[in-house]
Amino acid sequence: MRIIVNGTVLPLYSTLLEKLTPIESENVTLDGTLYTDYINNRRGWVAGWDKLKAADYDIIRALYNAQYTTEAVPVVQLVEYGIVAPMKMNISDRNIRMNGEIIEGVTVTFKEQYAIS
């Protein structure tokens, strides 16, 4: 399973989680009645790596940083699922091991820019 960000193939991940976030508005009236305005859903993906070489982490980190320096949302491809979409990236804290050679427990969250129906 491959993830490609702006043409760069990421290292093979250990875990991949799909997250659906409903775009909705919940309103509760004074008598306790709940009304919900359903609009759409937004997908997100969380890729996780148990251990990464420092050089592999640096590639992922550079892609993360580039969205701020270029002010452009990266285009992410989840090849096996046929998904190609602009997605905002977030990256977890860096857990440095073995004198900086290994980075453990890295997760990257990709949030699709546009909602899906």
Image: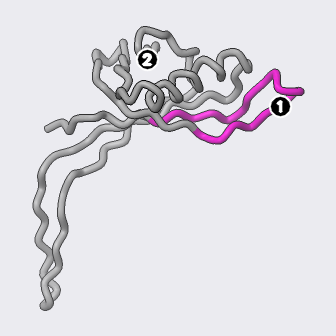
Q: Tell me the magenta residue range.
A: 92-109
Q: Which mark is residue 114?
A: none
Residue 69: horizontal and vertical position, in percent?
A: 47, 28
In the image, 3 versus 54, the foreground residue is 54
Magenta stretch, overall SS:
strand
Q: Locate residue 16 relative to residue 32 in the image: left or right.
A: right
- Which residue is painted at 49% across and 24% down in the image? 66
Question: In what element is the residue under mark 1?
Answer: strand
Q: Amino acid at mark 1?
A: Arg
- Which residue is painted at 65% across and 23% down in the image? 57
Q: Which residue is mark 1?
A: 97
Q: Which mark is residue 5?
A: 2
Q: Locate residue 111 relative to residue 25 in the image: left or right.
A: right
Q: Earlier in the sequence, mark 2 or mark 1?
A: 2
Q: Is residue 63 magenta?
A: no
- Which residue is painted at 70% across and 15% down in the image? 55
Residue 75: horizontal and vertical position, in percent?
A: 34, 20
Q: Which callout, 2 or 1, points to the residue nearer the camera?
A: 2
In the image, 39 versus 14, the foreground residue is 39
Residue 117, picture quadrant: top left
Residue 15: horizontal and vertical position, in percent?
A: 54, 29
Q: Locate residue 17 relative to residue 101 in the image: left or right.
A: left
Q: Amino acid at mark 2?
A: Val
Real-space CA distance between mark 2 and mark 1, rounded to the nearest whole angstrom:
26 Å
Residue 76: horizontal and vertical position, in percent?
A: 37, 20
